[in-house]
Amino acid sequence: MSGILDPSRVAPAPWRNAAGATRELATGTDASGRVLWRISVADLDRDAPFSTFPGLDRLFVALGPLQLTIDGRQQGLAVGDQARFTGEAPVTVALDTPTRALNVMTRRGACRAEVTLRPATAPRLPADATTTLTVLLDELAADVRLFKEPDD
């Protein structure tokens, strides 16, 4: 599967913890309706805790400068920097100015994700056997590749 995802065409929805807003762009589920992966763009306008998502792993891509605290460890991120953490981890964000972030969540043990950030005018990643979705982010674009984990 491949496609283009445009956050400007999706209305923001409040976070589960009501501390921010997100634009859910695409979700994949298994036969029972359980989320296997989810791609969203968060509008970050104030310091806030993140919602927890047990059983999911998160790939967070900063679209502006910010500070994450993950499990008590601070990490400064610039545009394009990525952080991986579990959905159970206590995470907070601190901001100097409002920004956005790309979030890709994957079901632990079922699939994983990679994100390549590039100028919007640069060519897309070539299609392959994985799912590749491109998220439009103004002057940037993010190519999200989703991989199925092998069954044990």
Image (cartoon, grey):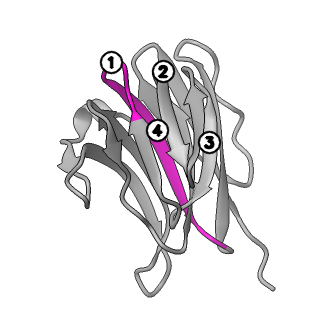
Out of 125 and 69, give the one closest to the viewer.
69
Judge whether residue 4 can be spotted in this image. Answer: no
Q: Earlier in the sequence, mark 4 or mark 3?
A: 3
Q: Which residue is mark 4?
A: 102
User: Residue visible at 52% across and 57% down?
Assistant: 105
Q: Earlier in the sequence, mark 1 or mark 4?
A: 1
* Contact flag, marks 3 and 1 (Cβ < 8 Å): no
Q: Earlier in the sequence, mark 3 or mark 2?
A: 2
Q: Residues within 10 Å of mark 3 (few under 14, many from 20)?
A: some
Q: Which residue is mark 1?
A: 97
Q: Which residue is mark 3?
A: 83
Q: CA distance from mark 3 to mark 1?
A: 19 Å
| Eye-nearest disc, 2 or 4 | 2
Q: Residues within 10 Å of mark 2 (few under 14, many from 20)?
A: some
Quadrant where the C terminus sits is bottom right
* Contact flag, marks 2 and 1 (Cβ < 8 Å): yes
Residue 51, image x and y in percent?
36, 59
For the residue labelled by badge 4, is the local secondary structure a helix, a strand or a loop?
strand
Q: Earlier in the sequence, mark 2 or mark 4?
A: 2
User: Residue visible at 57% across and 55% down?
Assistant: 71
Judge whether residue 40 can be spotted in this image. Answer: yes
